[in-house]
Image: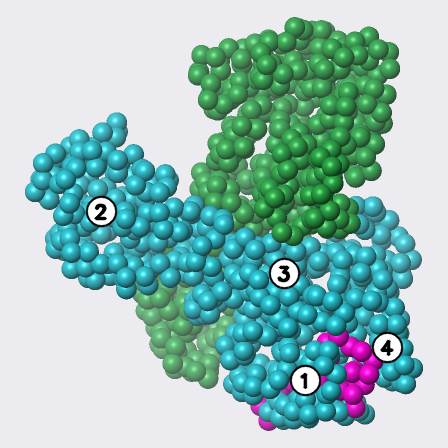
Chain colours: A green, B cyan
């Protein structure tokens, strides 16, 4: 039912088989009202949405048996894929609804929903533990009951996970629902979290449930459609999203951009080239009647969401989600904090889906980029799998030329010392990767990266840590440092003063880069001819 | 002729008065061939381009006198604003052209160009100094000659600055042309620089000429239309740009995005929602005939450029260009390096255009953000204009609550010590701003910022530096540190060990945040009642 095609970090591009067609994920489903829509479902299809979400509870209350006869696709006049919500949101906002989970389950099957949701009892945020626990139990019970009665083979059933911000309850809820025969899982309550920019909590909620859910079934994130956070939640492994915000924001004159939300009144230019923004001036949009303005902004908002989803998918395809997250994180400090918190506390979570080989080079910008899966994986392998019997370690700075063995100073070194280097382990010092033995120069991604990481105190200490670990692992007795790049000099000096049996060869003044004197000194230290 | 409306960093939104209408800057002019165009000028207008660039030399060679009779607007069937190039590019690519600057000057006036360019001799990059010098002199001479003969009042004349990558020649060239009566200036040779991603050099070239040119006339950057660098060059004060790349790239199957250039073959999704990408699938675009594909990609490329320009202008309007640059810089390591190099070496250049008061809050993400004009300006004013006679300095960590005097612990402090604080200067320690006296809490932007800067070693040293400067300026005799936030503790500890007459009050264990013990200690130190 769910086939995964490509992965990067914990994100994946996949395909869900529904009775109304194949749905590629990650995917946003615009939420539409079953009775009146500002943007018609046909328009949704034209804009490019393959699936929409609508409300089965309102459908039941409004159309009753007629809906069962016609089917939901005819009711809303849309022949794409339809997910229906059961009324859980209504329950959260207005209090109890007067149907049971079993009634909603039966109804959704009869109206032909492609993906149907159990009537859950959403927890919400800032809810005390007792009430949270209650909502979890009621929801799990509704889930079990639903699965007992459903018959229609072709309806995909979605099991909701509740618990609000109580991570332990979320975990328990996810563990239990993960064991049930649902086709898709869904995580509740992110809307309030996102509206208060509490992205840190959002990350924790998602990771908590992803760590215990079966990996081979899609995860839907309720109410999480905003361009700002789409890359983050996709990178964490969420596959489906619904968005009512495109319309709610439009009604409030709020205009989505890739970087956040702007009030139409505060804009001077339309920072967009969608079908609306490239055919209207800002003035025109502000001056049309209210209903028309709402519709135009809604279509713009939908276009931005679609673009963001495509851009994010392309990033997953390219193995470039980490870089994209780094760029997006600078759109808001809270997103930056959440991204860094994710890196600091949950980096292993991101490792599994990260490819061993990627089609594109890796870009390093800031020290935190050294926490990406490829680097951590490399460190692990270097210490576990690489060992040499040589007793002398010679360290050179990384070169712009890659693979490293093609760098001018390495080639000169070989020419000058030749066989004298037999007993020496030559390594390059890379700011992102630490120690790189010349033999590994070709291993992806050691010759496929670009780094702009600046050498500050903390970066130096981190590299030194890796050097010490490498020395310890291989029991080197003598360390030789070839210090010939001004930019690396502080690092070499720090190493010279921290390492035992360490000789630093200063070639900074060797402006013609012949390294004659330096190589003579190295030869002397390692007991070789030059 | 040129009216500046809004500024941020060195960038500005302005208006140029031409005979064919008002042109708002910054603005991109697509380059079109006067004879055959894949994208018709009418289409350009429909997409949203108010001005285009075409080649007067090719027009002369192809149409001759007919062009003088009809006028360039009729020749290319476009009634917007037209800038004409004289053949300088042809000279660079193919060698000498067989017209003189005076002939081109006269022709451009006769065909009714709205903005006309002197027939210059472009330098190019990687050209030896002798040849570079030659091209500079020839161009300056052509500029002088041109101004002597031009009569048409309503044609705006553009004076080109040459010198290639020889900064001293650029400077001299700009100084001399800046004294001439040109309406607009233009900087040559950035195309090759940009194609090799040498953004650092690009920054230096622009700053070199901007520092000596009159600020009240627009600057055109030849051949610099790419979404990746538009924000940077706008922030540096460039007002006009031409782009032939939209077409050259389209012919090579290269597809512009906000973050760089993709090969159509390498894309799986169309990361865009422009009029082309929202109405075609990737498959469709790949499968149409060659000419049609080139046209579609060209229109897409133009749409991306337009969107980027609008987004950049909105950022200038919002006073948020710095933040936007920070985000864009993460699209490519070379851009990141150029941005940081700009910050490290040329920060004063960015100060003038930066507003004293901005409508939006400032976001700080990384230590380099502390180099932004608002912060440097604040440091300067704090040392120059703020002085107190109090002899005791009390330092508290910055609070999330702003203005700082509304923070819970400050309010409690006042309640506890009251009049005892008369002789004490209370200040907050802000990671981006350094020392913030409580009296300045309301001054923009000290209560209008959000910071996610992490407290690492170099950040701590920087803050300590500002603290020492403040202490020195005001001759404080006693320093009291209230250490109550875990996250700030390393900073306070570093300060306690570096400052003389310093008392550190540890309130970390004061979990109920009553600060009773802490305040008693403070009272004791400052000799007051509690």
Nearer mark to the viewer, of 4 and 2: 4
Q: Which is more N-terminal, label 3 or label 2?
A: 3
Q: CA distance from mark 4 to mark 2?
A: 71 Å
Does A227 appear above or below B56? above
- The chain containing the residue under callout 2 comes to B
Which residue is depicted at the point 59% across and 36% down?
A: A233
- Mark 4: few, some, or many residues within 10 Å (few <14, many ≥20)? some
Mark 3 on the same chain as mark 4: yes
Label 3's element? loop
- Mark 2: few, some, or many residues within 10 Å (few <14, many ≥20)? many
Q: Which is more N-terminal, label 2 or label 4?
A: 4
Does A257 appear above or below B435? above
| Front residue of B241 and B500 | B241
Q: Which residue is mark 2?
A: B426
Q: Is residue B514 visible?
A: yes
Marks 2 and 3 close (CB-CB < 8 Å): no
Mark 4 on the same chain as mark 2: yes
Q: CA distance from mark 3 to mark 1?
A: 24 Å
Furthest residue toward front: B153
- The chain containing the residue under callout 1 comes to B
Does B500 appear above or below B279? below
Q: Give the residues drawn in magenta, as a range.
A: B103-131
């Amino acid at each position: 039912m769910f086939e995964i095609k490509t992965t990067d970090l914990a994100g994946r591009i996949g395909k869900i088989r529904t009775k109304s067609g194949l749905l590629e994920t990650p995917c946003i489903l615009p939420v539409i009202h079953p009775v009146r829509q500002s943007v018609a479902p046909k328009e949704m299809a034209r804009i490019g949405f393959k699936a929409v979400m609508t409300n089965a509870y309102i459908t039941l209350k409004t159309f009753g048996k007629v809906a069962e006869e016609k089917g939901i696709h005819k009711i809303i006049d849309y022949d794409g894929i339809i997910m229906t919500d059961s009324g859980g949101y209504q329950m959260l906002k207005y209090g109890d609804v007067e149907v049971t989970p079993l009634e909603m389950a039966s109804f959704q099957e009869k109206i032909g929903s492609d993906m149907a949701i159990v009537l859950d009892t959403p927890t919400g945020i800032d809810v005390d533990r007792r009430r949270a626990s209650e909502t979890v139990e009621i929801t799990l019970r509704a889930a079990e009951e639903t699965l007992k009665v459903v018959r229609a083979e072709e309806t995909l059933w979605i099991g909701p996970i509740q618990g609000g911000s109580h991570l332990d309850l979320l975990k328990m809820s996810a563990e239990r629902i993960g064991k049930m025969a649902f086709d898709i899982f869904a995580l509740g309550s992110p809307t309030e979290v996102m509206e208060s920019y509490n992205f840190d909590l959002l990350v924790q909620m998602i990771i908590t449930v992803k760590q215990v859910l079966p990996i081979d079934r899609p995860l839907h994130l309720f109410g999480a459609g905003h361009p700002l956070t789409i890359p983050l939640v996709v990178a964490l492994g969420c596959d489906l999203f619904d968005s009512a915000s495109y319309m709610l924001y439009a009604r409030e004159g709020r205009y989505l951009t890739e970087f956040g939300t702007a009030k139409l009144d505060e804009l001077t230019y339309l920072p967009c080239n969608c079908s609306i923004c490239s055919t209207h001036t800002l003035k025109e949009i502000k001056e049309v009647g209210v209903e028309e303005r709402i519709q135009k902004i809604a279509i713009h908002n939908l276009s931005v969401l679609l673009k963001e989803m495509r851009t994010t998918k392309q990033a997953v395809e390219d193995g470039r989600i980490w870089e994209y997250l780094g760029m997006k994180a600078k759109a808001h400090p809270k997103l930056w904090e959440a991204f860094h918190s994710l890196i600091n506390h949950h980096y292993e979570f991101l490792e599994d889906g990260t490819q061993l080989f990627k089609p594109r080079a890796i870009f390093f910008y800031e020290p935190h980029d050294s926490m990406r899966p490829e680097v951590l994986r490399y460190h692990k392998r270097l210490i576990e799998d690489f060992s040499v019997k040589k007793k002398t370690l010679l360290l050179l700075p990384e070169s712009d030329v890659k693979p490293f063995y093609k760098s001018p100073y390495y080639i000169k070194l070989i020419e000058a010392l030749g066989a004298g280097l037999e007993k020496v382990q030559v390594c390059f010092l890379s700011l992102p990767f630490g120690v790189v033995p010349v033999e590994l120069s070709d291993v992806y991604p050691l010759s496929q990266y670009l780094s702009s990481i600046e050498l500050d105190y903390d970066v130096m200490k981190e590299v030194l840590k890796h050097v010490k670990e490498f020395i310890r692992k291989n029991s080197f007795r003598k360390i030789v440092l070839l210090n010939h790049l001004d930019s690396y000099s502080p690092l070499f000096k720090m190493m010279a003063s921290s390492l035992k049996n360490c000789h630093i060869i200063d070639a900074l003044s060797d402006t013609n880069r012949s390294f004659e004197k330096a190589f003579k000194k190295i030869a002397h230290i390692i007991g070789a001819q030059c």
